[in-house]
Image (spheres, rainbow, N blue to C red):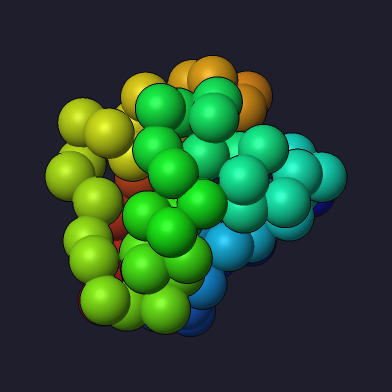
Amino acid sequence: MKFVANNYKSTEIIRIIREWSELNQTEFGKTINRSRDSINNIENGRNRMFLNDFLDMCNKHNIKITIEKTKN
């Protein structure tokens, strides 16, 4: 599956990755050493995730990050 991240809020991207992993917030949190409350807070915009943590999460869940410059 593929989507253009620019079309989504950061909170939605985290939720999409979790849903692709077919895990609830508790299970997903355990895979990245976070609590269910932490995942819930990230998905609801109350907390942010550092880029290094985001990249680590993507690696653990087989998510490929591609950056592409678009034409003007």
* Identity of the residue drawn at 42% across and 78% down: 44
Image position of 67 (left or right of 61): left
Above or below, 28 relative to 2: above
Compared with residue 25, is residue 46 higher up or lower down, i.e. above or below? below
Residue 23 seen in the figure: yes
Answer yes or no: is residue 13 visible. Answer: no
Q: Is residue 62 left or right of residue 38?
A: right
Instruction: Indicate the quadrant where residue 28 lies.
Output: top right
Residue drawn at (43%, 59%), measured in percent from left and top? 37
Out of 46 and 70, give the one closest to the viewer: 46
Q: Does residue 53 lie above or below 23 as drawn? A: above
Looking at the image, is 67 positioned above or below residue 12? above
Q: Position of residue 34 (x, y in %)?
A: 40, 38
Name the image quarter holding residue 56.
top left
**Quadrant of the snapshot with the C terminus:** bottom left
Residue at x 54%, y 30% (from the top left corner): 30
- Residue lying at 82% horizontally and 45% vertically, measured from the top left: 22
Is 4 or 56 nearer to us in this picture? 56
| Number of numbered callouts drawn | 0
